[in-house]
Image (cartoon, rainbow, N blue to C red):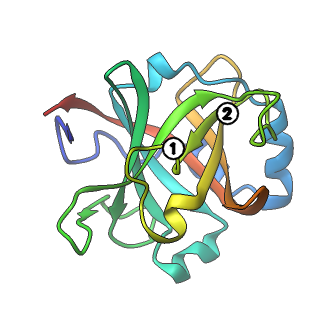
């Protein structure tokens, strides 16, 4: 289990983050293709402010979230934390899952393998929600995400493209932006 060192945001969303969130989805593919590969060692140990794109994701109650990255037993791993509300200027208040868990929708993190089924963005890290010991029930366990640096060489602002694995097909389900939020510590 991972816990934040400070459950409150350290700073409000940056102008660069808000600009990325406001980018029309038709332009995100270009950002994704030109992005750099994040350095997992610089992601690990941190939680990231996250926003699902497009803005219509708020209708499903999944507009904002927190994504954490850490290492356990030599494996690169991550998790999600639900956040109340959809307003990007309001405080990022965590919301527990119905079963009381803070973290949910866990995933593994690996470089993209050019010979694998999941190889859409070779410049990305690959987040596989189905490769953990106990995948989340429902759609979350079928998610497969690609994550890139918006500005190559900087791990402060990241863009993700999410897909749903249906057998050997990968169905695009949306985009997300990440910005460094707060340091975490192993519990």
Mark 2 vs 1, N-terminal side? 1
Q: Which mark is residue 16?
A: none
Image position, residue 119 (x, y; %): 79, 37
The residue depicted at 63 percent of the width and 50 percent of the height is 144
From the viewer's side, name the closer residue of 121 and 92: 121
Instruction: Determine whether the residue tagged by mark 1 lies in a helix, strand or loop.
Output: loop
Looking at the image, residue 122 sits to the left or right of residue 46; the answer is right
- Quadrant in which residue 105 is drawn: bottom left
Please give the residue where the numbered disc 1 appears in the rendered image: 131
Q: Which residue is mark 2?
A: 148
Q: Where is the C terminus found, in terms of image quarters?
A: top left
Above or below, comparing residue 40 to residue 107 in the picture: above
Whole-Å distance between the Cαs marked 2 and 1? Answer: 20 Å
Q: Is residue 94 left or right of residue 140?
A: left
Kindly state the secondary structure of the residue where label 2 is placed. strand
Crowd around label 1: few <14 · some 14–19 · many ≥20 (10 Å): some
- Tell me if residue 107 can be seen: yes
Mark whose residue sits in front, 2 or 1: 1
Of the 4 image quadrants, the one containing the N terminus is top left
Position of 103 compared to 131: left or right? Answer: left
Which residue shows up at 56% across the image and 18% down it? 39
Q: Is residue 173 above or below residue 66?
A: below
Q: Quadrant of residue 100?
A: bottom left
In this view, 134 is above or below 4: below
Residue 85 location, quadrant: bottom left
10 Å neighbourhood of mark 2: few (<14), some, or many (≥20)? many
How many labels were placed on the picture?
A: 2
The answer to whether residue 19 of the structure is visible from this angle is no
- Which of the two residues, 132 or 32, is positioned nearer the viewer here? 132
């Amino acid at each position: 289990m991972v816990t934040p060192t400070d459950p409150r945001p350290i700073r409000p969303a940056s102008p660069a983050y808000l600009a990325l969130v406001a980018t029309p989805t038709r332009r995100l593919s270009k950002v994704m293709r030109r992005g750099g590969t994040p350095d997992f060692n610089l992601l690990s140990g941190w939680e990231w402010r996250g926003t699902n794109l497009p803005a219509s994701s708020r209708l499903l109650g999944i507009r904002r979230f927190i994504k954490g990255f850490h290492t356990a037993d030599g494996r690169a791993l991550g998790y999600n934390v639900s956040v109340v509300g959809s307003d990007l200027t309001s405080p990022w208040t965590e919301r527990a899952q119905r079963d009381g868990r803070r973290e949910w929708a866990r995933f593994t993190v690996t470089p993209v393998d050019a010979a694998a089924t999941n190889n859409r963005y070779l410049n990305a890290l690959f987040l596989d929600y189905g490769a953990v010991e106990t995948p989340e029930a429902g759609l979350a366990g079928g998610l497969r995400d690609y994550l890139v640096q918006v500005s190559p060489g900087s791990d402060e602002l990241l863009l993700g493209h999410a897909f749903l694995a249906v057998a050997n097909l990968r169905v695009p389900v949306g985009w997300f932006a990440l910005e460094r939020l707060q340091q975490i510590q192993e519990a």
